[in-house]
Structure formats: structure tokens, C-alpha cells
Image: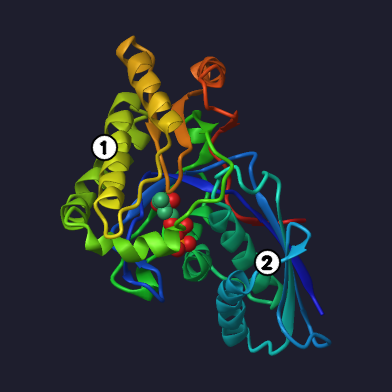
Amino acid sequence: MTTSTAIAHPNIAFIKYWGNRDERLRLPANGSISMNLDGLFTRTQVAFDSHLDGDKLILNDASAPDETLQRVRTILDEVRRLSGVTHFARVESRNNFPSGVGIASSASAFAALSLAASAAAGLELSEAHLSRLARLGSGSACRSVPAGFVEWLLGTGDLDSYAVSIASPDHWKLIDCVAVISREHKITGSTEGHRLAATSPLQEPRVADAPRRLDLCRQAILARDFDALARVVELDSHLMHAVMMTSTPALLYWEPATLTVMHAVRAWRGNGLPVCYTIDAGPNVHVLCEAAISEQIAARLNTIDGVQEVLVAGPGGPAHLEA
Ligand code: DP6
């Protein structure tokens, strides 16, 4: 029996993944770009064990629901297929950030699981292969495998749809100040949301324009051009939420305080502060700025009614094995 432990960070998408062209393989409708979030992580331990009579999953010290175990099995089955290992596995996973603050843990969780499981089975997968493996559990997880600023390539199929690093974590001291607005569990998760994307008449134009936005975002990151990044990041977030709001049934993730923060950020920018926002499938607002003003921005966010707490994270490293 061999045990391996891996650590991976969640990520925040600057250009969003929304909708799949192949649901089972999680092949996305469009490419996406994100930044790993330093300081926040999932640590996952995997052991293949001949004494087990089934795969076991412990999440934050509690046994996990069947649906989650099923997704974890997708990764374990693929690792067994690749390695020839036939034993069941015990998986123990823990986040260092409280669950229910609206920071999606599926990205860091499936990235850490893919690395820990493949190492425990004796595999040494390339970064691209590891990213493809993580993608099968959760699309955004493929972006938590490489370091820093990351692009998930659209690809033509399973073999070439994976994420690559476009800049290292120390390339740009960009900070994500997460204004936590609700700790409630979201009503419609992203897996269900991806299924609804195609019902919106706005999904097709959003997807058709994605290559242009990806270029703008990649160039803004490489040039450390905050104003250019702010323009494309807010546009992309608004486009995704427009698709969500015009799906059948419609998805509306914003709370009143979400809008309050959006207006505040726009007003600050109007007054000359380089700051912008992006919002995932929930009410929290990810407020981006450079490190020089991040304390000031976090302090301002903390004074807004309806903001429960502010988490602050810079660019994070790759998924890695614990020594
Ligand atoms: C809005 O990767 O969580 O955060 O593949 O079903 O696990 P599954 O979906 P997931 O979707 C992420 C959606 C998003 C945008 C993004 O991170 O790109």
C-alpha cells in the first residue's frame, strides 16, 4: 500500500468557462484563463489498499455524499486504468478555507486528488496529462494544476484540452480580494449550470467572441496592463451572467449586496483607483487590484453593508506533492 498527499489551490477565472461541448469529458464550449489563489488550498491524501471493499471518501472529516464519491470514482477509475492498480482507495481531503464561504473547492479538490491518486498508483504523469485527468472531475480543476496565471486550451478533444501556465506566480502581484456576501449553499451548482448554458440565446455570441477576449486577457497579463485586464475581465463576467440570467430556467446568482459591491468598485475606478471585479456562480464578488492598494481595497470592502468577510489572495503555485 502506498500513500501520497497532494496540495492544490483554487483559482479565479478572468475569462470564464460556462457550458460544455461534451458533458462527460468536460470539454468546454470555450477556452478560459484564471489565476491560482495562494494561501487557500485543498490537501488530499490517497491510499490504494487491498483490504478495502470499496472506494472511501472523507471530506473535511465527514463522509461525503454519494454524488461526490461518484465524481471522485471517475478519477480513481481512470488512474486504475492507466496504472493497472486494481485496489480500492481511501481518499481523505481537507480545505484550509471554510466550506460554505462560496469559494469553489471543486477546482483545488480535483487537482489535488488527481495528483495524489496518480502518485499513489506509481504514475508520473506529465503536467498536461494531470490537467486532463483533473478536468474529468471538474472542468475548472484542470486550471489548478499548472502554476500562476493559467489558460485552459479549448482543444479539439480529450487529448488536447488541458491547461498551461502563461505566466508564473511572481510575474505580477495581482490580488483577489473576495467580498464574501453569503455563506448559504448555492441553489444551482455549476455542473447543472453548464447544462443550461445552451438554452440561452446569448451563449452562442458569447462563445463566438471568446477567442478575442482570451487574446485581450492573455496580452493584458503578459504586459501587466491593469486597465486592459479590468475591461476584459468585467466584460467577460457580465457576458457569463447575461447567459445565466437568460437561460431556461433562469439563473440569478446576485444578491443585493453583490450589486452594492459592483457599484462601489465602479465608483472607485471612476475616481482613479485601478480596481475591477468578476463574479462566479454565486453572490460573492472577486475584486481584483495590484498589491500596492490591496489593503486599502480590502478595508473599503469590509465597510460595505452585507459583506461578511474579505479573503485576500495573490497568485498561487502549481498542484504539488507534499514532501
Ligand atoms: C462560473 O468547474 O465548477 O466558476 O466542471 O461542473 O465542476 P464543473 O464546473 P466548474 O465550473 C466553473 C464555473 C465558473 C467559471 C470558471 O471557473 O471558469
Residue depicted at x 59% and y 29%: 308
**Which residue is painted at 28% across and 40% down in the image?**
238
Spatial CA span between label 2 and label 1:
37 Å
The image position of residue 158, as x and y in percent, is: 38, 74
Crowding at mark 2 (Cα within 10 Å: few <14, some 14-19, many 20+): many
Seen in the image, is 202 located left or right of residue 42? left
Q: Quadrant of the N terminus?
A: bottom right
Residue drawn at (52%, 63%) of the image: 127
Residue at the top extreme? 271
Which of these two is toward me, 171 or 288?
288
Please say if 58 is above or below 224.
below
Circle 1: is it few (<14), some (14-19), or many (20+) Cα within 10 Å? some
The answer to whether residue 150 is left or right of residue 232 is right
Residue 280 circle label = none
Taking depth in this image into account, of 191 and 111 the one nearest to the observer is 191
Task: Tell me whether circle 2 and circle 1 mark residues in contact (CB < 8 Å).
Answer: no
Q: Is residue 281 visible?
A: yes
* Amino acid at the residue labelled 2: Ala
Residue pictured at 24% horizontal, 63% vertical: 198
Query: On residue 235, which mark appears?
Result: 1
Q: Amino acid at mark 1?
A: Leu
92, above or below 304, in the image: below
Location of residue 162 in the rendering, given as x and y in whole percent from the top left corner: 41, 63
> Is residue 114 toward the left or the right of residue 230 in the image?
right
* Image position, residue 14 (x, y; %): 38, 42
Residue matched to label 2: 116
First in sequence: mark 2 vs mark 1: 2
Please tell me in which quarter of the rendered image ligand 1 is found.
bottom left
Which marked residue is nearer to the observer: mark 2 or mark 1? 1
Q: In this orientation, does residue 164 appear? A: no
